[in-house]
Amino acid sequence: MADKAQIQEAIKAQGEVVRKLKADKASKEQIDEEVSKLLQLKAQIGGDEGKHVFVLKTPKGTRDYNPKQMAIREKVFNTIISCFKRHGAETIDTPVFELKETLTGKYGEDSKLIYDLKDQGGELLSLRYDLTVPFARYLAMNKITNIKRYHIAKVYRRDNPAMTRGRYREFYQCDFDIAGQYDPMIPDAECLRIVHEILSELELGDFRIKVNDRRILDGMFAACGVPDDKFRTICSSVDKLDKMPWEEVKNEIVKEKGLPEEVADQIGEYVRMQAGGMELAEQLLQDPKLSKSKAAVAGLTDIKLLFSYLQLFKVTDKVVFDLSLARGLDYYTGVIYEAILTQAGVAPIPAPQEANGSTGDDGPVSVGSVAGGGRYDGLVGMFDPKGRKVPCVGVSIGIERIFSIMEQKAEVSAEKVRTTETQVLVVSAQKNLLEERLKLTSELWEAGIKAEVLYKRNPKLLSQLQHCEETGIPLVAILGEQELRDGVVKLRNVASREEMDVSRADLVEEIRKRTPQS
Amino acid sequence: MADKAQIQEAIKAQGEVVRKLKADKASKEQIDEEVSKLLQLKAQIGGDEGKHVFVLKTPKGTRDYNPKQMAIREKVFNTIISCFKRHGAETIDTPVFELKETLTGKYGEDSKLIYDLKDQGGELLSLRYDLTVPFARYLAMNKITNIKRYHIAKVYRRDNPAMTRGRYREFYQCDFDIAGQYDPMIPDAECLRIVHEILSELELGDFRIKVNDRRILDGMFAACGVPDDKFRTICSSVDKLDKMPWEEVKNEIVKEKGLPEEVADQIGEYVRMQAGGMELAEQLLQDPKLSKSKAAVAGLTDIKLLFSYLQLFKVTDKVVFDLSLARGLDYYTGVIYEAILTQAGVAPIPAPQEANGSTGDDGPVSVGSVAGGGRYDGLVGMFDPKGRKVPCVGVSIGIERIFSIMEQKAEVSAEKVRTTETQVLVVSAQKNLLEERLKLTSELWEAGIKAEVLYKRNPKLLSQLQHCEETGIPLVAILGEQELRDGVVKLRNVASREEMDVSRADLVEEIRKRTPQS
């Protein structure tokens, strides 16, 4: 341990840093960061009486969810899970950590962001980085060739989080995938229908779902004369088109990535085509260059088929075929898609990590992206000892961004977010009625009514009513000497302040009538 | 890396070990363990074509939950969460890891079981060991003095798991706690009422809830002449009374723990008293020795008060005051309780780690224990820089054991566990009706019906019906040329094989009538 005087010196210096930041009105994150350092220094020398002082914080990049955030989270999850169940999905769960080697070689450069566990003897372990690789491991390990499953769980990335932008090191992913050998584009179409249902039901405002196909991109790049080994890097340049004008992207392709200008111009002609639907695919199938690429033709034919199913699913109002959609992930082999919010009202929200996908480059995603996915037919085969493939298509809902939007909406809304579902508070206006309150509360629980009672012998009526105001309990059941004698309970509506005497026998029914059931 | 020939030698030897175990019909766990070693050796030299071979397993002490296990888990959670909500609880969530020092000094010897993360630069982190310490950290950090919250999440212990006994290194805890300064025994009584409700609703068979108080135990030990510094170790001997006869426990107290025989005999008189209710507390208040201990009198008075509330809550049929209940945890300061299943039908089920509590000794718990908890008024103060106390009382439901029991029950039950909630499968008897199937399915989704359709252009009717049998889908909506012409759908009950034509307009209503809503 360092010398105590030294530490006290460091504390003094660090205190100055914090004071200066505060004086300069620095960002909350910056101040928090320095305060945390200060507290850690203080912890080293102990508190006033030499007592150990805890640094009261959660680890960097993580957060607690308070009851209000949890209430919003639960609501969002319920909507999404209902949709997954409506489509016949099962769910699985996997451990929060995997053998280190299960994750090795799946995330390219981003592998450096994986949290490893300390070697305490035994196996080498890492926290999961996404849900897709554990899913592929699960399928290969259990020799499952057919499943429609969702998985909602936290994943871990040692990213440098810009917490102001809502990025965390511990965050939720919310994945739905269909694995199995099926006829083309049917499960793919269902994934898009699911995105459409979820975004509509969450009422996040208007949205658009862009669709493309890796084979079309590959065929297009080949047709334009991009060398095979540059497909990926050109892909990631193209992916920036929703955030920068073509001239800048072209500049990047020519200057940074070293392609001839005429190649870039040819790419430009394609990717700047107006997004469309089936007719755009039809038109491109007639394109003299693209029609020579087997990959492009296969992709375009499938896009046509996909749109015919999307019409039956009534979602073509929101889905567009967009040649400029690239998506960063390595493992996609067919259709890819991404949903973005288009409503002006949506505040600039952080890029969701999970919609950025699970492997490959760390490139930017569109502002407003709230879901993304695609077909990956090769991943499971990486785990199978004999390389047997299980074709998969899936979608990841950008749940953290959706939480942020919902939290913002709750913030500005007049309606208070309730964190409990209590229907009624059992109160007394007079003293010495605790036993009667407990008895009535117990009767209500017995009948399945959500009921609370204050844990005081003789609480004031006012403080009982205040508890209702604060927590949004809509009804109060009031007991008094008179009510007990008459065999009634006074039922009070907290909002309207209306009161009525209800016979004890009818109380449950009256409460049910006056409160939402869930 | 070791020499390849050496590894091949080791593989050969290990292969023999596995073969021998299989020939000897060794336990699945033993075989799996050795197979895993074999696979790891094989992985070192690569697969057939020198391709890297993955060890396809989850880390030691962890497991995947398959869809069937998840369906059971969801059902159990729903019952428990409904109960918590009925009692007005909020929920919070905390990160899966905490600063290492947050956990330091909270778990005594068991600290060695904490999973640390690798130091990759930045803060030193550990996986949470329970939910109670993060809860206390949360309260202190946010200066919360009043909350009623539940928290269901996984915790991590590097225990040597006996997987045959259902113990895991990653397992769920399911905690409900009431924090705040209230009048005595009211929140404590509610915790017991909650245990009673949950165990009744889960239909796990008959149960008993034992109650005692740390102050009574302390007073009793003092009265019998146990030195202060031996209270805890004698506590843990007494805790074994539900698994061994008094003579053995006495032997341990005298021979191993070195107390005089007459002291042990005096303890024996108390702890072998028939468990009772309020009258036992009354009787002990008259006891010449106990009545001299301030702690014992406070505890006994509170037990009496507790039972008076339990009577109002109508749970005294299952709750007994039992002087032999000790519980291992250090941090309890008042009432303690533990629920056990008493029905003969319950198979010997592994001791749940979580009901064993979160700190202190690793001692055995009663066979059949499914919930436990108590009052801990000092823990939050350990985190508060000024040592401000927030009194807490809580209960932990032994959820992993409950899962095991429910899984066993499902195993022997005739009723199949469904892993999806699909109400209807849309099928066709003839070819070339994919588009019509998709269209109808989409209409059903639109109406909120849980509907599936096979992802094949022309699936056989038999394979469509088989899918229903396998997954428990109760209804089939059959489309054919004739039905399309007539504007009807043939609705078939999979179990009874009854069929009826339903007009398209009435289909949604008919499906709703014939399937459970959820």
Image (cartoon, coloured by chain):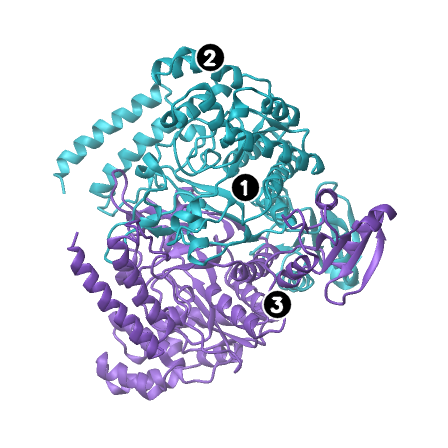
Chain colours: A cyan, B purple
Percent across and percent down for residue A179 are 53, 49
Residue position for label 3: B416
Could you say whether the residue bearing mark 1 is in a helix, strand or loop?
Answer: helix
The residue nearer to you, when weighing A251 against A118, is: A251
Q: Give whichever of discs 2 and 1 has the lower sequence position.
A: 1
Q: Which residue is mark 1?
A: A68
Name the residue tied to disc 2.
Answer: A265
Find residue A12 and report its horizontal and vertical position in percent: 21, 29
Give the quadrant of residue A248.
top left
Q: CA distance from mark 3 to mark 1?
A: 38 Å
The answer to whether residue A392 is visible is yes
Q: Position of residue A188 (x, y in %)?
A: 58, 40
For badge 3, the amino acid type reads Lys
Q: Amino acid at mark 2?
A: Asp
Residue neighbourhood size for the residue with mark 1, other residues' Cα within 10 Å, grouped as few (<14), some (14–19), many (≥20): some
The answer, for residue B288, to whether it is visible in the render is no
Secondary structure, mark 2, is helix
Position of the N terminus of chain A by quadrant: top left
| Residue A129 on image: x %, y % | 39, 43
Chain identity of mark 3: B
Which image quadrant is residue B155 in?
Answer: bottom left
Q: Residue at x 31, y 35 (%)?
A: A36
Above or below for A463 versus B189: above
Q: Nearer the viewer, residue B457 or A213?
A: B457
Q: Which of labels 3 and 1 is toward the front?
A: 3
Side of B359 where B150 appears, left or right: right
| 10 Å crowding of disc 3: few (<14), some (14-19), many (20+) | few
The quadrant where residue B518 appears? bottom right
Label at residue A329: none
